[in-house]
Amino acid sequence: MAQTTINDISVDSSLVDPEKDLLGHANFAKYLADSICKMTFPEGFVIAVYGSWNSGKSTLLNFVVHYLQQKPDEEQPIIVPFNPWLLSGHQNITRRFFEQLQNVLSQQSSVPKGLKERLADFAAIISDIPLPYAQTGKALAALLDEKDKEAAQLKEEVEDTLVQQQRRIVVTIDDIDRLPAEDIKQLFRIFKAMRNFTNVVYLLVFDKQVVMKTIADPKEISGEEYLEKIIQVSFELPVPDKISLRRLLFEKLDNIFTESPKPEINQTRWGEIYFQGIDRFINSVRDITRFVNTLTVTYPAVKDEVNPVDFIAIESLRVFSPNIYSIIHQNPHILVGEVNPSIEELNSLLNTWIAQLPVEDKQPVKNLLMHLFPKLKSVFYNTCLHKKQELEWRKQLRVCSLEIFPIYFRLSLSAVESSNSQIKTILGLVADVDKFRTHLIELAKQKLPNGTTQARVFLEQLENCTEEEIPVNYIPLIVETLFDVSEQLLSQDYKAKGILDFGNEVIISRCISQLLCQIDEISRFELLKKIILQGKALPIINHEIAILKEQQSQYDAEKSNYEEGLLVNAQHLKELEEITTRIQVKSDTIC
């Protein structure tokens, strides 16, 4: 079985063989290689290819080198590869550059003897050139012509030696834009010092904007002007077209999913999901890098347990629309469970989710949600879902199967607290008490790694909601439902960790009290009276009565005049206690 290697982990790994070109760089590289070999110039020549990060600059450079190496012996230049980024911060780049140049030239029989030694001495001189870099040329002239006549003679000898040797020298330099400012300036100092060395061509690839910002000096010269003084000709690497990007993406995806059973890849469905959703997010090689790197890590953990097409779609949301991905992760029972919001409620929820997205992302994300979760589609298009379909989705390992859904999120960190989006989603069900109740019970069944449940997380977040976030007309429904489902919530009780931690009973009661504070005292009393008379949730009712009594006792002891701070007044509390006692006696008698 094939295994992922370290070179597969990133599409940032550049290509070497032009036969594998997917971005249209090979032809340009071939013609550039031809020009480098055939052009005539009186002295050293500097060529630059500009491109942003992950645009394929390194691949282009590799292709040029490939074509140079394919030239006939009489045309083939001496290639000196140099990657300063590998040396940055460890040693003097100027010295290391000349060492590399010496090492390569010394291996060539056509290079005159003594050049290595001359270059070593010249390197020492260049390394001592003082700042500022914008005046490097003047500094060099002063150093060679005025202070050190012997060094000036040495420079002439190097030039003469280079003229004598027949083969052109091509110095290729990559990753300049990754260097610290000091190292970039050192490197450009070399080009300025050696640009009149005959038969030497420099081929540089870097991000122009990054380098210009680094070398710019308002007191001396702009970055643009500085580059113009050094580089004789430059090219802008074009952004690959959509078709080329798709080919590159699909090739990288094939490397990841090549061992997936073919029947699971439904080409029609994959085409709809890709072109109606994912394609919107693939606009550069960088996008492909982020996406493929994520899949390279996440897919092995669920391989053979998920539908590849669904998994690619879900992970595209993780990378390009993380808020939507989080909403999906936190709301399985709205998307795939038995809770069935009305079309109005579901439309409201979906619009709330989509509203946070950039305009250009809204429709593609909505399309992905529709394709992934048939429940959404059935509501909007008024179609029916059958039990047989659920069984088929389970067989196909689809994310819309409630049993399979959690597998897709194995490498997703569980939220410590519900997001605002999830709170809005759950509160959107309040208008239908039955659906709200069912959803809370489902949340109580969802265990988190820390031992608590999604219901506990929801309650703690609900307690922190502001009055603006919870409409007043919702409060009686929420409170009544919390009492109603409290037994189910307590049956999944979180085991307190230590004597100062809280159980769910305390959390439920605090949440109820916080909600009751947002309505007037008469409404609180009538609501509590109604709930107690229903005879449900006696543990929480007794806990709530105990809290009310404690508040009253504190009020009496302090002789406070702030009775309005109590949830219910003394008379109402007495009445609630009496009702609770009767209900408790009745319950005990039945038992």
Image: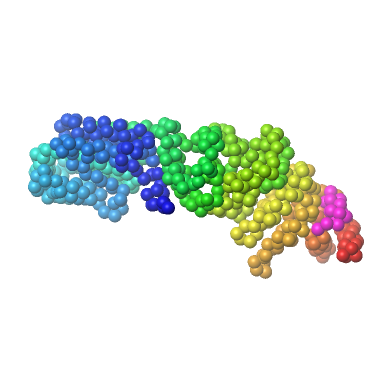
Q: Is residue 410 left or right of residue 154?
A: right
* Picture coordinates of residue 337, whole percent (x, y): 68, 47
Residue at 50% in and 35% down: 279
Image: magenta residue range: 523-537
The residue nearer to you, when weighing 257 against 578, is 257
Residue at 46% in and 47% down: 259
| The stretch drawn in magenta includes residue 380 | no
- Which secondary structure is most common in the magenta stretch? helix
Q: Is residue 157 visible?
A: yes
**101, above or below 41, in the image:** below
The residue nearer to you, when weighing 588 against 224, is 588
- Where, by quadrant of the figure, is residue 321 drawn? top right
The total number of labels drawn is: 0
Quarter occupied by the C terminus: bottom right
Q: Is residue 412 visible?
A: no
* Picture coordinates of residue 123, whole percent (x, y): 18, 48
Residue at 22% in and 32% down: 34
- Which scheme is used to colour this image of the protein? rainbow
Residue at 58% in and 43% down: 324
Residue placed farthest to the bottom in the image? Answer: 499
The residue nearer to you, when weighing 168 against 306, is 306
Residue placed farthest to the front in the image? Answer: 263
